[in-house]
Image (tube, grey):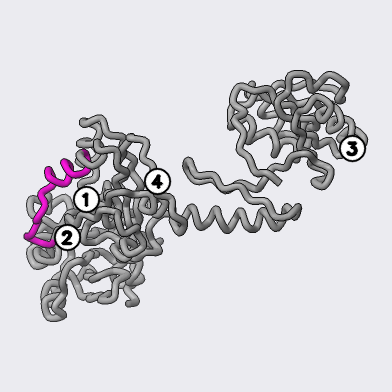
Amino acid sequence: MYPLQLDVAGRRVVVVGGGPVAARRATPLVDAGAEVQVIAPYLCEPLAELVAAGRVTWSPRDYTGGDLDGAWLVHTATGDARVDDAVAAAADAQRTWCVRADDAARSAAWTPAVARVGDVLVAVTAGGDPRRAVRLRNAVQTALETGELPLRRTRRDGRGSVALVGGGPGHTGLITTRGRQLLAAADVVVVDRLGPRALLAELDDDVEVIDVGKTPGHHPVPQHEINRLLVEHAQLGKQVVRLKGGDPFVLGRGGEEAAACRAAGVPVEVIPGVTSAIAVPAAAGIPVTHRGLAKQFTVVSGHEGLNWAHLAGTEGTLVFLMGVSLLADTAAQLVAHGMDPDTPAAVVEDGFGPRQRVTTAPLSGIAAAAREAGAQPPAVIVVGDVAALATA
C-alpha cells in the first residue's frame, strides 16, 4: 500500500449513497474544499443538512452510468454490493480512484482513521481492521491533544505568534489540553513563578525559557519589559507561549499583554486557565458558592486602595489573591466597615503544591492565626460562611 494525501480543494468528488457511512465520507471532503456531489434516492439527516447548507449538491436518484464523469475521486457506500461493484468498475475504467465502504479487500483506495490537532494530521491504517485503526487513532489523538507528542515545528514559516496560556493553580494536570498543545509547539516560553513549571522539563533542549517570575515586593522584570519580550520574539517568527499561573485575565495582567501584542500587529491567542480564586479554595474543600451559604463570590486583589465599605457589605464569598502580607489590615478594615467579626475565614497556602496547608479562624482572629502558623505566599484568602467547610 502507498500512503498519500490528496488536495481535493475545488475538485469534483462523487459520493454514491445517502446513509450514515456516506455522510462520514462526505463531511471531511467538504471540509477540505472538495466539490462534492451525492447521488442517492434518499439522504440521512447529516447529509441533508450539508445539502440544505449548500455545501454539497444532491442528485435524488439511483446511480447511473456517466455519473462519475469528471470526478477526481469516488466513494461508494450504498449497502448494495451490485451497485458498489458497478461504481467501482466504472471508476476503474476511467482511472479514477474509488473507495468502497463495503469491502476493503476489493477497494482500490482506503480512507484512514485520522487524528488532527491544528495543522498536524496523522492517518492510521491497521491492516484492514477499521476498529483497530480507530483505537489507535484515538490514542494518537489523545497524545496530540495533551502535548505528549512533539508538535513543535522545525521549519518555521516566518509567522510568529503569542499564546497567553493560563496554566491553572500549578498542578501539571490542571492545565487545559489546548495549553499543553501550545506549550509542546513553543519556541520560546515566558514563564511566571506560579505557572506549572514542572512541564518545562518536557520541552526540547533548544526551547528558550525566560523566567519573569515575581515575588511579593520583587519584580525583577517589569511588565513593560515582559510585553516587549513577547512582541520581539514573535516578530522574529517564533511561537511564543506566555505561561501564567491561574487564568491570564484574572488579576494576571494578561489583558495588558494581549493589548501590547495587538498594537504591534502580533497574532495573540488567549487560553483560559483554572483560576486559583476557585481552584485553591476547592483544594481545601471550600466551595466558593454553596446552597444556603453563598450564591455569589467576589475576587479581589489583596492590595491597598480597595472600597472596604462595598466589600464589607457584599453578600456571598470574598476571595483575596496576593493578600497575605496585608491580611491584618484586610480583616480590620472589613470589621471596621460592618462585617461580622465572627465571619469564618481561611488562608489556603500553596494550593495543590507540596506545602498545601489551610488555616481557619473567625475574621477577627484570622491574621493572628495565620501569623502564628507562619503563613506564606502564594496563598488565597477566603472570607465568608463557606470557609467553615474547609476540610484540609
Residue type of the residue flagged with mark 2: Met
Q: Which is closer to the viewer, label 3 or label 1?
A: 3
Q: Mark 1 points at which residue?
A: 251
Task: Please report contact status of discs 2 and 1: CB closer than 8 Å, yes or no.
Answer: yes
Q: Distance between the residues labelled 1 and 4?
A: 32 Å
Q: Position of residue 288 (x, y in %)?
A: 33, 61
Q: Position of residue 112 (x, y in %)?
A: 67, 46
Q: In this orientation, which residue lies closer to the viewer: 25 or 342?
A: 25
Find the magenta span and give its range: 215-231
The label shown at residue 153 is 4
Residue type of the residue flagged with mark 4: Arg
Task: Please report contact status of discs 3 and 1: CB closer than 8 Å, yes or no.
Answer: no
Q: Which is closer to the viewer, label 4 or label 3?
A: 4
Q: How far apart are marks 2 and 1 (CA)?
A: 9 Å
Q: Where is residue 201 in the image (x, y as percent from the top left)?
A: 32, 64
Q: In this orientation, which residue lies closer to the viewer: 340 or 149?
A: 149
Q: Is residue 341 left or right of residue 247?
A: left
